[in-house]
Image (cartoon, coloured by chain):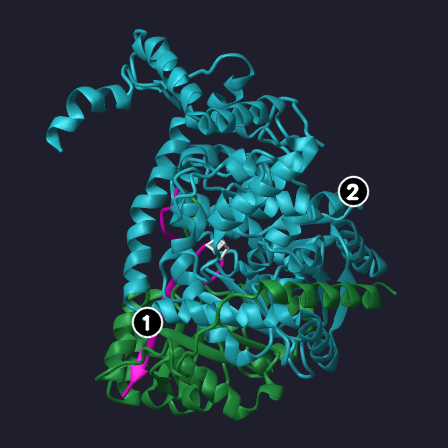
Amino acid sequence: MNSSSPTTETDYIRSTHHEFLAASEKALRTPSLQIILGQLGDTLGQRNRDAWQQLPNSDLVRQRARQIKDDTLANLHEHLQTLEISVQARGGQVHWADDGHAASKIIVDLIKQRGYSRVVKSKSMTSEEIHLNPALEAAGITTVETDLGEYIIQLAGHRPSHIVGPALHLSAVEVAEILSQPAGRTLAAERETLAAFARQELRQKFAEAEVGISGANFAVAETGTIVLVSNEGNARLTTALPKMHIAVMGMEKVIPKLADLPYFLKVLARAATGQKLSVYTSFVTGARRAGETDGAEEFHLVILDNGRSQILGSPLRESLFCIRCGACLNACPIYRSVGGHAYGGVYAGPIGAVLTPLYDGLAANHHLPHASSLCGACQAACPVKIQIPEMLVKLREQMHDEPTLKNGMESFAYRMWAKTLKRPWLYRLSTWLATRTVGRWYRKSPWLKKLPGKLHGWTKKRDFPAPAAARFRDWWEKEGRHGS
Amino acid sequence: MAREAFLARVKQAAEIGRAYRVEHQQLAPDVGYVGVTGDACAKLAQEIDAVGGIATIVDSLGQAREILAGYLLEAEAKTALCWQHPLLMRLQLNELLAERNVTRVDYDSANSLTQPARRLEQLACEIGITSVDLAIAETGTLLMCHHPGQERLASLLPPVHVAIVEQSQIVPDLLDAFRILHERGVQNLPSNITLITGPSKTGDIELQLTTGVHGPGRWRVIIIR
Ligand code: SF4
């Protein structure tokens, strides 16, 4: 659905968020957002560089992580089967979900069958992708996000604007306004006060919850272990306190062996937040065992396809290497100008520009492959070295091959361009015309802000270089030759 | 069945996808190993401080007791959530707590309560006291394998977490820790293992660091040489 309805920032449903241009223009006009996005590059950038410097041969470690992903995908079905056997051997259950709808239904049914109604959730992009929260709500299940950022945006009704920092788009003053609602009093816009309030409020929710839902950063096939990486500790609480733990993961999260894990751990936090390791890394292997007093009594793993098998057999397969660290967002000049909401999907930034068209259809997200300058900063930042720019170009190609996505005027312009280049007399004539007309008009800058007619679609997203006041060949005849 | 169709689809896609595999390069087995040179205790302490904890190196159990007593005071602890661990036994933790009128909450005491009562008691503790299975010097990380007597909640629920580490528990690098897990047998992983590198942190409000949002905001490690 390519909706042209006005964008709001206040719903979870991405189908109304396909207005990249309007949303990015709005973001550019929001000063508080611009300040935060500026800090992303400045402070975080330096921390990342420091952390990488302290890992000798970091390039080879990234290479290693990349190889493990590549090898795993080549036999993904086998690793998933091994994972299933391992999880079952430890008393857990595995569920297979073809798409987001199926996954949500499995989760809702598991909870309802037991008569449970209170859920705490730790941050999971996959659950955003399948729109789990609305599905739980519709089934009358109370769901509380426990990651501070997710909790804030859940209360505000926003969507996440960053893979790692979902509430990055909000200032402390805005957060204070949002949290003052449940507090029933006006909270000061100080981080400590706000965090302390959230801690106290969420403790209550943890104590009451019957079900904990988490994602999975990795799933180890040989041991049936779900690995959860977090800085706050909410993932630990989510998996330690409630009676039932449901983990939901995209099928590409599986890695074959426990010994593969340290390479990912060594690069993930460095890329994400410039830490050597995140504060908490939890390995959850099955449910609570006999004699233990914490941990869930029941463990379920929901494995999601939702278009991934389509990608697995395509030239864009490499996008499945992504470990959701957010580094490409932080590095991207476009993301750092427009923020996450402009992308309109669950996954923002350069990798979002690849994933959203893949998961959600190219036609509905045709702006995204163009929302990149192809500068390569994302690829340089990526801990598994995903060739994001190359994939964006591939998507642009696909778009070109799809007749419904073709812009008639643009093709016409390119055809004319090709014809002109093939005929020297025509080329000479047109450059002469261009310099004598537009080239010599009064202009404030060497860029045209708006091309005439339908071509203005091109200048909606960028400026067009104006023709010079004189042709190079004329200049060369007059001046250039003397120097040679 | 959904499962068979799912796996058949993945198998087919994985096979087609092999046409797009990425370039490979032979890598040395120790790639990514950082380790430490010199004093492992000092390095561990330095890294713990760097991630926002406070580490103290002591030479004897007696000194460790003194430091711990200071932390009990600082936390104004009336109840302590404790592991039952050989090192804590040697430290005579029970006696220390009794002397200070701090109620000890541990596996044995929790087991005598019903689930809701146990949770309330655990949630109310002011300090958590644990040892570790391993400590990783390079990153300032504590590795904990959870079993009855070594509960996850002790390092998670209270606002202060104190861990007592002995030199013999320290390994240089994360890769060493994984090697040891392997030696103990990967098929026998406990239901939960946690790596802890710092006090609970968030950068969710304006990218500024805030501690203690869910886990302990104060993280103290006593290292016994
Ligand atoms: S594409 Fe790479 S840099 Fe971007 S989120 Fe995924 S792993 Fe991180």
Which residue position is annotated with label 2?
A138
Q: Which residues are magenta?
A: B206-225
Q: Which chain is green?
A: B
Which of the pair B222/B45 is nearer the observer? B45
The numbered mark at residue A380 is none
Return the residue found at the far right: B1
Q: Residue at x 49, y 32 (%)?
A: A177
The quarter of the rendered structure image containing the C terminus of chain B is bottom left
Which of the pair A283/A234 is nearer the observer? A283
- State which quadrant residue A80 falls in: bottom right
Q: Which chain is cyan?
A: A
- A68 above or below A110? below
Which of the pair B201/A342 is nearer the observer? A342
Labels 1 and 2 touching (C-beta < 8 A): no
Q: Chain of mark 2?
A: A
Whether residue B219 appears in magenta in the rendering, the answer is yes
